[in-house]
Image: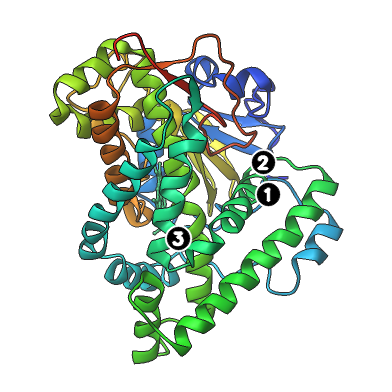
Amino acid sequence: MTAPSARPAHASFNPFDAAYLADPYPQLAESPAAFYAPELDMWVLTRFDDLDAVFRDPVTYSASIVQDPLFPLSQAARAELGPDFPLPRTMSNADPPDHSRIRRINLQAFSARRTAALEPRVRVAAAELIDALPTTGSFDLVAGLSHPLPAFMIFALIGFPAADTELLKSWCGDRMAFSWGHPEPAEQLEIAGKMRRYWEYCTRFVAGRIAEPCDDFTSDLVRIHLADPGQLSPLEITSIAYGLSFAGHETTTNLTSNAIRRLLENRDQWDALCADPALIPNAVEEVLRYDTSVIAWRRRTTRAVRVGDTDIPAGARLLLMLGSAGRDAARFPDPERFDVHREDAGRHLAFGKGIHFCLGAPLARMEVRIVLELLTAAAPDLELVGDQRLDFPPNVSFRGPSQLWLRRGARA
Ligand code: HEM
């Protein structure tokens, strides 16, 4: 436990509560800037400026815990994971100097050239999926488009064989519950076995690329390793492939679904994009501000700090509420209004900031932009199916509906 004797407890904060999962924003709006959440044994920070300061100070706020299971694992689950776990910290959960070295290498391999080169493939893949959506009756956008598109793109970028897509997708879903959810011991054990197989899969895959590099992101990393083995080890490459295959997937699935949901709920905004596709890039920023897909991220204090008038001890785990930072009235005027014309929409913290700024931000932005370009052109009459209850997977960080039911409307 990390809490000091005097703490401003906020006992009602439970991110696994059904009402919070359905709509966390009213509760977050009423929350203090910083408070201790006993259910999580974490300190929760909700204001834009405080999060901004945390992201800018990686010495005081270590990223080491961001991938760890939120709650302690059972002994059986730990044993099932095998001797390779915990995995080497490579990027999002590494601190300098290791982070600086690995990030620099990733920036070389994750170049603007490789991201831009993906755009035609994203366009073709998105167009195929959109063409296959039913024109009569209702359909689930998550199953038909928002889930398969980012999965296909990130696995293709890494170089995973297309035939393994379904297997990888299911492992990624389990990983969300494992590290950011609250699985029961039996579920922990089952997922631990899958995580071990997922890791073993990545290990075999990287060994194959070392034996025979080709034209993909992993092979770029392998070439850096082969040129200077001291720069990047095979274990680190494996950890990067394991990390990216998750980071590049659920995040963008959820952002795509959140974007379509919010635009169709605010019909005038959807119609504005149909009439003027030049608004789409700013609309993507507005979704990242208003309904981001990574609603919370983590840090650990390396020394005692004061946030506002709250004292937080050294070694405390922090939950940084990116979702409420995007709706902080001190930063965004009229923050509860969803507005694709908002001038400062892009000043959100949805991709973090500083040394850990999201490596996949250009790819995520591109994927959602292309989906909106194609969908507004192909189906301007799209509507939400009325009276649907949206379900959100129970976890603290990744937020998007499990299903989103749509249909073509009367204007077809
Ligand atoms: C809408 C989609 C996405 C959102 C909202 C998002 C959000 C974030 C956030 C909040 C962070 C942590 C920043 C910090 O700690 O300061 C992060 C880091 C990261 N993201 Fe994303 N992300 C998205 C898509 C992607 C994609 C598509 C990829 C890969 C292709 C990716 C790869 C990464 C990596 C590797 C890091 C760690 C970077 C580092 O530690 O240096 N993300 N992302």
Location of the N terminus (image quadrant):
top right
Q: Tell me the tag on residue 181.
A: 2
Side of 88 relative to 192 (left or right): left
Q: Amino acid at mark 1?
A: Phe
The crowd level at tag 2 (other Cα within 10 Å; few <14, some 14-19, many 20+) is many
Circle 3 sits in a helix, a strand or a loop, which is it?
helix
Residue farthest to the front? 136
In-image side of 267 versus 67 (left or right): left
Mark 1 and mark 2: Cα distance apart in space = 6 Å
Q: Residue at x 31, y 34 (%)?
A: 348
- Tell me the crowding category of disc 1: few under 14, some 14 to 19, or many 20 or more residues within 10 angstroms, Cα based: many
Q: Position of residue 232 (x, y in %)?
A: 43, 81
SS at badge 2: loop
Indicate whether 215 appears above or below 169. below
Tell me the amino acid under the disc marked 2: Gly
Query: Which one is closest to the eye, mark 1 or mark 3?
Result: 3
Q: Earlier in the sequence, mark 1 or mark 3?
A: 3
Query: Residue 391 lies in what quarter of the image?
Result: top right
**Which corner quadrant holds the C terminus?**
top left
Query: Quick check: marks 1 and 2 in contact, CB under 8 Å?
Result: yes
The answer to which of marks 2 and 3 sits earlier in the sequence is 3
Is residue 341 visible in the rendered image? The answer is: no
Mark 3, other Cα within 10 Å: few <14 / some 14–19 / many ≥20: many
- The residue to which callout 3 is attached is 155
Q: Position of residue 15 (x, y in %)?
A: 63, 29
> What is the spatial separation of the Cα atoms under label 2 and label 3, in whole angstroms?
24 Å
